Amino acid sequence: MRNSSPFGLSKGPAAVALLVLAFLLLFLLVPVAMVFHTAFVNADGSFTLGHFQSFFHQPLMQEAFFNSLYVAGWSTLLASLIAVPLAYFTVRFEFRGALIIQTLGVLPLIMPPFVGAVAMQLIFGRSGSVNLLLGDWFDINIPLMEGLNSVIFVEALHYFPFILMNLVVALRNIDGSMEEAAFNLGSRGFRLFRRIIFPLALPGFVAGASLVFIKVFDDLGTPLVLGATNMLAPQAYLRITQVGLEDPLGYVIGVIIIAFSIVSLWLSTRLLGGKDYSTLQKGGGAIQKRRLRPAESVLAYGWIILVLLLVLSPHIGVLLLSFASVWSYAPLPDGYTMAHYASVFQDSSGMIANTLLYCGLAAGLDVALGTAIAYLLLRTRLPARQWLDWLASAALAIPGIVLAIGLLRTFRGVEIPFTGTLLTGSWVLIMIAYSVRRLPYALRSCVASLQQINVSLEEAAQSMGANRWRTIRRVVVPLMAGGMLAGFVTSFVTAAVELSATIMLVTRESQAPMSYGIYLYMQSASGRGPGAALGVLAVVAVAIGTYASHVLVQRSTARQRPARTNNNEELEAL
């Protein structure tokens, strides 16, 4: 029997909620719980802390633990030194091309760090372009790409946009009258920034910095590509792949990584707790951007140009490497060729096809789940529906390697029905991991899209005789189409460059997607050219997808009003 209110309880929404919950429990909560369970039990099932004692008594594990903290801490500091001046200069002073500068500042997020890591070695390594020139000109060498320094440098350049984006928003929201008052009372330069501006923008900075710390701490691909295996994530990968799924230390590392992610978020909240950062008005229109004096302009533009050169260096390096016939002990390649791209399309077409298959199915599943959760959350009164949102969003806090280890442990020995194929040896598990990892992106797009749809449209449709499912199909889904497409594209392009889970779940080369193919190519000097070409294709795909998602969101927003205005005709057709 159909309910008269779109918010009423019925068997249909309850069944959908159970299906969504089953998916999240089976492929997210249970695998993560399995990692925790295995880390705290003996072979006979009894509780123990011995695995953690064993971990902290092994010199290699101690080294990996402190190296991960060291790299995450210094990467966050270096990312802050890059992002804070860039955000402050472009927001609080008059700059030609400020929007372009901020846009280029976000560009590193388009390229996964492991893609540009090898190219960074060719540019900043001991025998790279920069050090060759510095050696010829000044007889000096900068060890940027040696040991853990290489990981810090690459990670900081890749993740500093998280701080930049959050800090730019925070700076724009500051009440300009407070800065003007301090300025009129004689506060200038760094004192003004230290005493007034930065403290008020601290929430944005802390949000970005904590995210950088977490992302660096659990990153797997960059340390592996750079050969820095004495860190936690690479050690977890090596323990599981070399010792086996029964080795408890791999699970202990997974628990430690999740614990530090949670602790870093908790500390960032505690740091801001009990303090008031609110202002009376937003600062965007309350203060005129100040002009820099000539000497200040030279310093500011010099810093920005230096930062942008560093930001673009991985992209430039990968592009040059993809066309280089020979590039060794020279500032630039000795020759150029298209052979690497021809090799990729000839030998790696299966990887491209696998990427399209896995990411397409995962993104489609994410949109279906995201739409269902959004509808249950905003259009029903189901008990505990908020938990579906929280559980799905929790995937953001779960590192890819931890999820992969949990999936392998949970589904070992399980066969896909009617095929006789082990789930852990099939591409299906890779697709599921992509879907779980990227579900929060699609969910946020679907929730935002549904929030913009007035419930009166659905009530009108039901009052004219349409049942719930027909209302969803003819009214809700068409109006949500833009947000759903944006969620699909975002999930697709971010899954296309996922390596942490991929490298654990791929069992044979025929299953490999592009991200794993890049990693395989980069393991040998002869394969770096094709690997760079494949990386360029991945970056282009991500860039196009990112642009397409923005266009879809804008068009969806622009069409919302006309769609609502003309919706009476659609309702009559029901």
Image: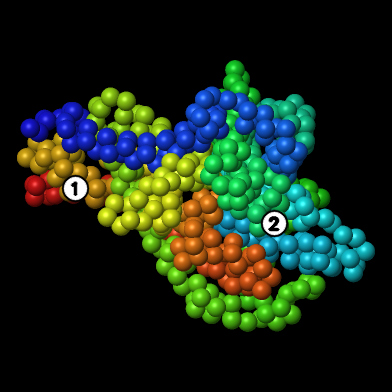
Quadrant housing residue 555:
bottom left
Query: Which one is in front, 13 or 280?
Result: 13
In front: label 2 or label 1? 2
Q: Amino acid at mark 2?
A: Leu
Q: Position of residue 461 (x, y in %)?
A: 13, 40
Extreme top residue here? 274
Q: Determine which residue is flagged by label 1.
A: 473
**Circle nearer the N terminus (2, 1):** 2
Residue drawn at (71%, 61%), measured in percent from left and top?
120
Distance in Å between CA atoms under marks 2 and 1: 50 Å
With 558 as the anchor, is 308 left or right in this view? right
Mark 1 lies on a secondary structure that is helix
Which amino acid type is shown beneath numbered disc 1? Arg
Identify the residue at horizontal 18%, vertical 36% (top origin).
12
Q: List the residue tagged with mark 2.
A: 226
Q: Is residue 160 visible?
A: no
Q: Residue at x 56, y 47 (%)?
A: 244
